[in-house]
């Protein structure tokens, strides 16, 4: 039997297509399920929320309870992604070597750009222990084991898993594969001389059906081409999108473009990505009825772009009703100084109004929480109790918490039941408050992101 292993911190909203021969062991799904278990989140909150706890622990307990409550709600949209990201960050925070969220891993010491640092972190990391134990039991009877690591953030777990397989089965050949494994092939061979390192397997990817309403939607990145005549979505640089035949966009459900600029007044026929070369995407944008959901991942500080380019691009795209997926710093050599500061400014200025993706995962391009007209309770907010000192030091009470903005507001004892009702979709009790109270409290809730104002 051949055993194929999906390593933690892969995109959990994707699945392999077609499934590989032999047995598929998706330890990424196990990892996400364990770290986002509502019971575990509440237990984590209880360990933090004590009478003498510090304000930060109390705040983290509120977010853990909020994430648990939101994960128990039905549906797969932006709110679920926000809750998953929050849950993984909180429950994975105690590891001595790494920190994680839904789409990222950081080393407590060193850089993910250094395989030496990654290997050192893998030797000390404890977070992947339960999944490594599952793998040890499964690998004992395997004739060969394929460990897929497509991103650098998966490499620590991949090294942990390679050791687990070897301890359980000294005979089975181990193959480390995937884009990231291929990029670090020579260094990985030096670290793991007994393992084979090769490029990506022949499997493609599709978005899990729960995020697509049951439809098959293939996921396209890099230089991949969508399957002819089948639904697809993707996250592409403009140059890669330009290589896709225009007729294929009739089957595109959503497309996120990594954009640095749009040159001149021409617009979509001069779109610039990370390589600085304008390409013609006039057949892709601007958005049109029945066309794909378009979003832009704004690349800040790319070579050849002037100061203020990113902000001008954001304004232009928002005017065309293109969703802003997020802002990120150009990391290669040639990036201008102060780029991260520029990213922070853009996030502060436009983050609250652009509804950026909750995480850099495939499903984010296909899901967006609906925006009802007028003032409405934000789906990423809820009301949870605090039993300890509270983040404000004022003792037990109820707090309205927003996972979208990261804000928590203490609710006065008489107000908490009204907010809980509004959270359940019943706004009448809140609307019945005296006008002055309604305006003041409504303004505070709006500012904190607990309540949002629709079109």
Image (cartoon, rainbow, N blue to C red):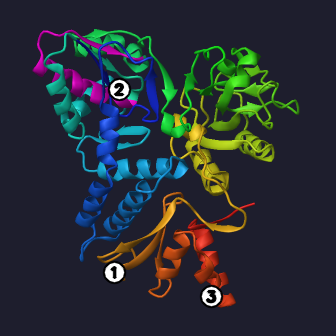
| Numbered mark located on residue 396 in the image | 1
Callout 3: few (<14), some (14-19), or many (20+) C-alpha neighbours within 10 Å?
some
Towards the viewer: 411 or 233: 233
Tell us which disc is closer to us: 1 or 3. 3
Q: Quadrant of residue 54?
A: bottom left
| Numbered mark located on residue 433 in the image | 3
| Numbered mark located on residue 114 in the image | 2
**Residue 383, position in %: x, y?**
45, 71
Q: Is residue 2 above or below residue 104?
A: above
Report, in whole angstroms, how far the alpha carbon at label 1 lies from the one at label 2: 45 Å
Residue found farthest to the right = 265
Residue at point 25% right, 34% down? 121
**Residue 24, position in %: x, y?**
31, 22
**Residues rendered magenta in the picture:** 153-178
Q: Is residue 175 magenta?
A: yes
Q: Is residue 325 magenta?
A: no
Q: Is residue 399 left or right of residue 433?
A: left
Q: Number of marks in the image?
A: 3
Residue at point 72% right, 14% down? 245
Which comes sooner in the sequence, label 1 or label 3? Answer: 1
Which comes sooner in the sequence, label 1 or label 2? Answer: 2
**Residue 355, position in %: x, y?**
63, 51
Q: Secondary structure at mark 1?
A: loop
* Residues at marks 3 and 2 touching, judged by CB atoms closer than 8 Å: no
**Residue 326, position in %: x, y?**
60, 43
Q: Quadrant of the C terminus?
A: bottom right
Towards the viewer: 209 or 103: 209
Tell us which disc is closer to us: 3 or 2. 3
Towards the viewer: 361 or 377: 377
Which comes sooner in the sequence, label 3 or label 2? Answer: 2
Q: Quadrant of residue 179?
A: top left
Residue at point 72% right, 20% down? 277
């Amino acid at each position: 039997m051949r055993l194929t292993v999906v390593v933690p911190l892969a995109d959990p909203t994707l699945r392999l297509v077609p499934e590989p021969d032999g047995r598929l062991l998706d330890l990424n799904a196990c990892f996400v399920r364990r770290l986002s278990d509502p019971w575990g989140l509440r237990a984590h909150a209880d360990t933090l929320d004590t009478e003498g706890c510090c304000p930060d622990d109390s705040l983290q307990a509120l977010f853990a309870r909020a994430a648990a409550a939101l994960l128990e709600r039905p549906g797969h949209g932006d709110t679920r992604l926000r809750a998953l990201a929050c849950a993984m960050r909180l429950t994975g925070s105690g590891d001595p070597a790494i920190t994680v969220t839904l789409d990222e891993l950081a080393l407590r010491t060193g850089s993910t750009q250094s395989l030496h640092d990654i290997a050192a972190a893998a030797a000390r990391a404890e977070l992947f222990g339960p999944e490594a134990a599952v793998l040890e039991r499964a690998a004992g009877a395997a004739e060969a084991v394929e460990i897929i690591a497509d991103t650098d953030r998966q490499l620590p777990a991949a090294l942990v898993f390679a050791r687990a397989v070897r301890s359980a089965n000294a005979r089975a050949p181990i193959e480390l594969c995937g884009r990231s494994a291929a990029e670090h092939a020579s260094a990985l061979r030096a670290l793991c001389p007994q393992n084979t390192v090769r490029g990506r397997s022949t499997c493609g990817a599709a978005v899990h059906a729960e995020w697509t309403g049951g439809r098959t939607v293939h996921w396209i990145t890099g230089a991949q081409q969508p399957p002819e005549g089948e639904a697809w979505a993707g996250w592409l640089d403009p140059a890669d999108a330009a290589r896709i035949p225009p007729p294929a966009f009739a089957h595109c459900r959503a497309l996120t473009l990594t954009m640095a600029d749009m040159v001149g007044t021409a617009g979509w026929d001069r779109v610039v990505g990370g390589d600085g070369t304008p390409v013609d995407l006039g057949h892709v944008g601007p958005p049109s009825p029945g066309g794909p959901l378009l979003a832009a991942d704004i690349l800040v500080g790319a070579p050849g772009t002037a100061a203020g380019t990113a902000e001008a691009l954001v304004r232009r795209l928002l005017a065309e009703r293109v969703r802003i997926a997020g802002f990120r710093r150009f990391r290669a050599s040639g990036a201008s100084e102060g780029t991260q500061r520029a990213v922070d400014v853009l996030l502060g200025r436009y983050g609250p109004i652009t509804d950026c993706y909750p995480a850099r995962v495939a499903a984010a391009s296909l899901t967006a929480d609906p925006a009802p007209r007028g003032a409405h309770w934000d789906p990423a907010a809820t009301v949870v109790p605090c039993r300890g000192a509270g983040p404000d030091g004022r003792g037990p009470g109820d707090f309205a918490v927003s996972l979208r903005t990261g804000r928590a507001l203490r609710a006065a004892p008489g107000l908490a039941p009204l907010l809980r009702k509004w959270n359940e979709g019943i706004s009448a009790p809140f609307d019945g408050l005296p006008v002055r109270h309604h305006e003041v409290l409504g303004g505070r809730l709006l500012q904190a992101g607990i309540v949002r104002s629709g079109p």
